[in-house]
Amino acid sequence: MLTLYSSGSSGNSYKVRLMLAKLGRPFRLIEVDIFAGENRTPEFLAMNPEGRVPLLAVDGHFLAESNAILFYLAEGTGFLPQAPLEKAETLRWMFFEQHSHEPGIAAARFWLRQVRGGRDLRTHDVDRWMEEGYGALNVMERHLESRPEGSDFFVGAQLTIADIALYAHTHVAEEGDFSLAGFPAIRAWLARVAAAPGHVDMAWRPQGATA
Amino acid sequence: MLTLYSSGSSGNSYKVRLMLAKLGRPFRLIEVDIFAGENRTPEFLAMNPEGRVPLLAVDGHFLAESNAILFYLAEGTGFLPQAPLEKAETLRWMFFEQHSHEPGIAAARFWLRQVRGGRDLRTHDVDRWMEEGYGALNVMERHLESRPEGSDFFVGAQLTIADIALYAHTHVAEEGDFSLAGFPAIRAWLARVAAAPGHVDMAWRPQGATA
């Protein structure tokens, strides 16, 4: 059985829980308390030298990086297009998510809402998160606006792991002080993702398999 | 024929030139002068709303994100492992590259060497690039040190697109004021990548196909 090392409040961890729930795959969940430093212990660093969740244990191997885990789980399913160009386009949005979207949007939520600032929070960091985060939201809005009729998701007509990757942090962007008021296409897309079959929210956990 | 929009000094663009050279695939190269703002024109933004190179035109479609382009070009070749877990591990290092490696290491080179600072260069940005960049180099060094005998590259025994993605910015990290003196495993790996068949350096261009 798969084992997922996950943090309840982490958007990156939520991506993987959502994917596993949609696939109906049983898995063991191990909650890692990052606020207590459980991701920095020698034992955890031996599994993932980056000290990050999510981390998927599969066949004795530890797979890191939320989007690589999504790809691994989605291969051979309808959540990853098979046509080479559509598959590459799916990855394009996932690399965009990790490079241009998550660093601003997730960092703002983490520091403003979860850590609540403290002495380490610097104005210039907040400014940068806002600039980068709104830049990413603008790219998403323009892409969604330009989609042809019937293309309700980021790639093609069906929900893919590109949508799951982007949904995780976007649907809680307002917790990081971003306003989605000016992004109607994003708000409509968020509602479509949340209405898709097998959707679960961030609080969902697999029954009877939590360590 | 493929058309690649590319910037000569961009590590992300170099990844794709290196891949195409290794594959021996003919392509048309269009140089985009990012210092003259050619990536911010309405024409370019219509092709890629992010305003970034590299951008690959294939069958009338514009594919963005260097690592998504690498994946597209490598599918079905020896540069992308076919086994699901090895393929996911390849992507793991490519997501690491875009999230944790490129933002520090490439930004330092871009601002310190290419733009050469100016009024916009702030000490706190340089500090962050150094912290993030050395953090990423440490993760790479530890991974390379721990590889079993015969595993000369990031995933398995053969060079993959994970190596190409990580090589592009790492081999010029010293141009961004990073020292690789304390990273012997990285230096040995850089030499192995540079010695692999079909290697070309950043200055290489396809003959007779440059627009």
Image (tube, coloured by chain):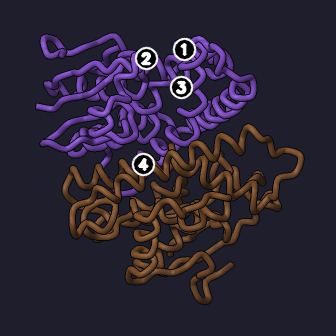
Chain colours: A brown, B purple
Secondary element at image label 3: helix
Q: CA gap, disc 4 to disc 1?
A: 25 Å
Residue shown at the point (27%, 27%) measured from the top left: B5
How busy is the neighbourhood of tag 1: few (under 14 within 10 Å), some, or many (20 plus)?
few
Q: In this view, does A150 lie to the left or right of A62?
A: left
* Residue at image mark 1: B115
Tag 4: amino acid: Val
* Residue at image mark 4: A139
How busy is the neighbourhood of tag 4: few (under 14 within 10 Å), some, or many (20 plus)?
some
Q: CA gap, disc 1 to disc 3?
A: 12 Å
Q: Is residue B140 above or below residue A84?
A: above
Q: Where is residue A185 in the image (x, y as percent from the top left)?
A: 40, 64
Looking at the picture, tell me which residue is in the foreground, B27 or B77: B27
Badge 2 vs badge 4, beta-carbon distance below 8 Å: no
Q: In this view, does B125 lie to the left or right of A198?
A: right
Q: Position of residue B140 (x, y in %)?
A: 58, 34
Badge 2 vs badge 1, beta-carbon distance below 8 Å: yes
Q: Position of residue B129 (x, y in %)?
A: 66, 29
- Nearer the camera: disc 2 or disc 3: 2
* Residue at image mark 2: B35
Looking at the picture, tell me which residue is in the foreground, B200 or B78: B200
